[in-house]
Image (cartoon, coloured by chain):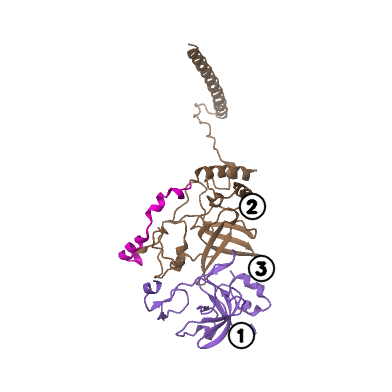
Amino acid sequence: MALLRKGLGFLLTHASGKSQQLPFSHSAACAAIQKMSRVRVVDNSPLGNTPHHRPAKCIHVYNKTGVGKVGDKILLAIKGQKKKALIIGHKMPGPRMMPRFDSNNVVLIEDNGNPTGTRIKVPVPSSLRRLEGEYSKVLAIAQKFV
Amino acid sequence: MAASRKAGLSGCSFIIFSKTARSNLQQRLRSTSTRFHSSDSGDGQPPKFMPPPKPVIVDKTQAEATQRRFLSPEFIPPRQRTNPIKFVIERKDMIQRRKVLNIPEFYAGSILAVNVADPYANGKTNRFVGICTQRSGKGLGATFVLRNIIDGQGVEICYELYNPQIHQIEVLKLEKRLDDNLMYLRDALPEYCTIDFNMKPVPHPANGEVPVNQLKVKMKPKPWSKRWERPKFKIQGIRFELTLSEEKMEEAKKWDQPWLEFDMLKEYDTSKIEKQTWEEVQREMSK
């Protein structure tokens, strides 16, 4: 029913930063990040920001459960290559005092935990500061904490 | 006969009483007029009659707090099969917390600023400013959702009113909107949710009606997160004519359930409970 309602060639209404015409219909995301979920890369790395005809998708979550929440490491498929990323915020409502974002935000990361980009303009939840030891460099490039 | 005599007697006593009262008043007035007399005795002309100043009654018992009768919606218990003792204890705890932290009056559509304890922020407190999109929950678990758009990214935080981590709740702009639930702001244009973090508090009157903002919001193109045009949401605050055609509006009316408002089993009259709870809250807060 939902597929019949939405036509082909729909604009991505969520704030992805790119106004691309996706040739398939899609429903609004309301869950946390798992396999095959499209994510939005929010740092200023060239890999995350160059336009591609396919959005970045999660292909694995490094977690006992397959569901990624804020602060979890995931594997992305971007531009035909595999890249690790850190979840910065998601659309799913979480614990009461935590912020909920309007898009699933993700920051590209190397294998040792260093960020690929140099700046994160999007607000970052301050609960990420508990990852001071492992992802301190990611926190260092974040500009605004909510 | 006796009744008439009694009535006559009582009538007499009343007249006497009023006579004495009147004479007292006249004496008081004479004394004030003589005071004024004495001050103006220097002129040869008769002094102008200066009426005594009208007494200005200032309600100092509720100086800072609003003099509007507002009972926070989480005090009204839901209609459930729970023991009423639970609600009594909860109300006691809620009032105790309200004595420590001032939880102001606000509605969905007001702009609030919240200071929360954060171990990682400098100054140990984190501040968030946003528009209140909904108030839900009853008792100690009552929550309100603040929405703001920061750097182009929409952020929503659901705060618990009675959470001890909250240091301060400040109302920057007190107003109501056409709806109780503003969830549709997620699909509205971002200009309606961007609120400046350094916004100055707008002074609102302590008495009288809360201003209702008659704003009708423009939406982003469909698809929306929910089908807001459907009658079950009863939304007044969206300009549907800009995105939806007449046929779509007619089609949406197919999901209307007009019998729901006449359902007697869903009736819940809270007027008595509100009155009792209001008196209890006022009593406990003044202690």
In the rendered image of this protein, does residue A124 appear above or below residue A110?
Answer: above
Q: Nearer the viewer, residue A21 or A2?
A: A2
Q: Quadrant of residue B233?
A: bottom left
State the residue lying farthest toward the right: A133
Eye-nearest disc, 2 or 3: 2
Please provide percent x and percent y for residue B135: 52, 57
In the displayed structure image, the side of residue B97 where residue B147 appears, left or right: left
Q: Which residue is mark 3?
A: B122
Look at the image and give the residue range highlighted in magenta: B241-268
SS category of the residue bearing label 3: loop
Q: Nearer the viewer, residue B36 or B122?
A: B122
The answer to whether the residues at label 3 and label 1 have Cβ atoms under 8 Å apart is: no
Q: Which residue is mark 2?
A: B97
Q: Nearer the viewer, residue A12 or B231?
A: B231
Q: Which chain is purple?
A: A
State the residue lying farthest toward the top: B1
Residue A117 visible to the viewer: no
Q: Which chain is brown?
A: B
Q: Residues within 10 Å of mark 1 (few under 14, many from 20)?
A: few
Please provide percent x and percent y for residue B40: 55, 29
Image quadrant holding the C terminus of chain B, namely: top right
- In three-dimensional space, the C-alpha distance between marks 2 and 3, rounded to whole angstroms, equals 26 Å
Disc 3 with disc 1 on a shared chain: no
Residue B262 magenta: yes
Q: Which residue is mark 1?
A: A110
In the displayed structure image, the side of residue B239 where residue B114 appears, left or right: right
The residue sitting at 52% across, 85% down in the picture is: A78
